[in-house]
């Protein structure tokens, strides 16, 4: 579907639960009011049918932590029967046991969020001692034949760990992408590290060269990175310092069934679930949401409203 600025909106980012088993401080508000009422498989199937008919082609399942849903394999089956590509964003803690079932169900790849390979720092950032589970999950996903990428949020807290993350990425041949921190939840401006700061720091240790190659459908820009013993590809998602809204092809479904045309405008939304059995009205609402998609985000550390990322799904 084209929006009013001519962008082709074909990519759904779908939060299927707001529950999470980690507590990354930048992702969550202090007191969360969980609805704990995730969309049923029946609702997911009905929505998938409509979105497919409207021309949506790609889905990224997110949360909360989507692997907490016991029926995730069924969710993937429903979506992969209808869309060209279904992928998953996950903290990886529960991937070890389910990767091969997810692959069989049609999942194409996983983005695993990993902010540190140092277990103390991992505990400090996520509030849980689960680094080994994440590493096991990454290996299992790769073994199952899923494409794997790592996502790291750039923070003052983990800036010292960037080299270790890159070394891990080069050793395992799994690309890592560094995401600029966005003003959600309890985030403070002092926590922010820009892409430029990170590149400066990485260049002290590695040779970096910007490349045109793209991995996947997202907005990352990529660099070839060369160390003394290895080389690979790393990416950046500089949502704050370099907007990429003009090429945004996404719309988001929150865990409570609202359609959000822009991550940075969580108050601009359209309800879907109250008309789930009325196909005509559902289509109208989806068209309305696409129409409401703002041209660009206005993330601002001083003024942005502090919604929880978990509900929207990142
Ligand atoms: N639980 C899953 C995970 O950890 O990937 C999926 C949900 S999480 C909300 C999706 C992505 O959003 C993660 O990569 C997370 O690091 C990122 N994220 C959360 N809060 C963020 C923030 N304030 N700024 C930038 N990225 C954020």
Image (cartoon, rainbow, N blue to C red):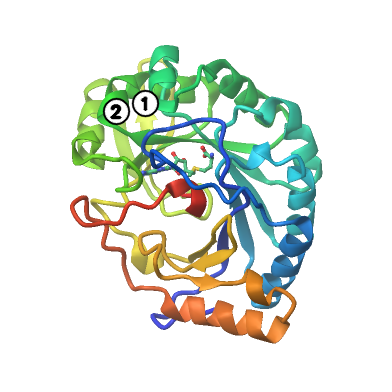
Q: Compared to 187, does 127 lie above or below?
A: above
Q: Compared to 288, does 196 lie above or below?
A: above
Q: Position of residue 39 (x, y in %)?
A: 68, 57
Left-right relation of 179 to 50: left
Left-right relation of 60 to 102: left
Residue 83, quarter of picture: bottom right
- In terms of secondary structure, where does tag 1 sit? strand
Q: Position of residue 190 (x, y in %)?
A: 18, 35
Q: Is mark 2 within 8 Å of ligand 1?
A: no
Q: What residue is at 79 percent from the left and 52 percent from the top?
A: 77
Asked whether residue 171 appears in the rendered view, the answer is: yes
Q: What residue is at 38 percent from the left and 20 percent from the top?
A: 124
Left-right relation of 126 to 50: left
Q: Compared to 58, does 134 lie above or below?
A: above
Q: Earlier in the sequence, mark 2 or mark 1?
A: 2
Residue 217, label in figure: none
Q: Position of residue 165 (x, y in %)?
A: 41, 23
- The crowd level at tag 2 (other Cα within 10 Å; few <14, some 14-19, many 20+) is some
Tags 2 and 1 in contact by the CB under 8 Å rule?
A: yes
Q: Is mark 1 within 8 Å of ligand 1?
A: no
Q: Nearer the viewer, residue 104 or 126?
A: 126
Q: Nearer the viewer, residue 45 or 203?
A: 45
Q: Ligand 1, what quadrant?
A: top left
Quarter of the image that includes the N terminus: bottom right
CA gap between label 2 and label 1 equals 5 Å
Residue 207, label in figure: 2
Q: Which residue is disc 1 drawn over? A: 226
- The crowd level at tag 1 (other Cα within 10 Å; few <14, some 14-19, many 20+) is some
Left-right relation of 90 to 249: right
């Amino acid at each position: 579907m084209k929006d009013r600025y001519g962008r082709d909106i074909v990519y759904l980012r779908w939060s299927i639960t707001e529950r999470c088993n980690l507590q990354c401080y930048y992702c969550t508000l202090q007191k969360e009011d969980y609805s704990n009422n995730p969309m049923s498989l029946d609702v997911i199937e009905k929505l998938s049918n409509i979105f497919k008919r409207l021309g949506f082609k790609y889905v990224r399942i997110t949360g909360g932590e989507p692997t907490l849903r016991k029926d995730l394999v069924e969710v993937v089956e429903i979506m992969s029967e209808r869309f060209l590509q279904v992928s998953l964003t996950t903290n990886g803690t529960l991937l070890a046991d389910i990767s091969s079932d997810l692959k069989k169900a049609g999942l194409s790849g996983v983005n695993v969020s990993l902010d540190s390979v140092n277990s103390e720092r991992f505990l400090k950032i996520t509030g849980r001692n689960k680094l080994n589970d994440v590493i096991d999950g990454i290996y299992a996903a790769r073994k199952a034949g899923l494409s794997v990428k790592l996502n790291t949020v750039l923070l003052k807290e983990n800036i010292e760990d960037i080299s270790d993350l890159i070394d891990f990425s080069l050793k395992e041949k799994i690309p890592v992408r560094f995401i600029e921190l966005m003003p959600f939840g309890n985030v403070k401006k002092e926590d922010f590290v820009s892409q430029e700061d990170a590149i400066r720091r990485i260049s002290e240790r590695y040779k970096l060269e910007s490349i045109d190659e793209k991995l996947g459908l997202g907005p990352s820009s990529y660099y070839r990175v060369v160390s003394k013993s290895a080389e690979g590809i790393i990416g950046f998602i500089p949502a704050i310092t370099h907007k990429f809204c003009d090429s945004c092809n996404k719309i988001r479904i929150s865990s409570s069934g609202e359609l959000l045309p822009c991550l940075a405008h969580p108050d601009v939304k359209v309800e879907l679930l109250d008309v789930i059995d009325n196909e005509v009205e559902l289509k109208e609402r989806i068209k309305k949401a696409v129409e409401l998609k703002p041209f660009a985000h206005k993330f601002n550390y001083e003024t942005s409203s502090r919604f929880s990322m978990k509900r929207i799904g990142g």
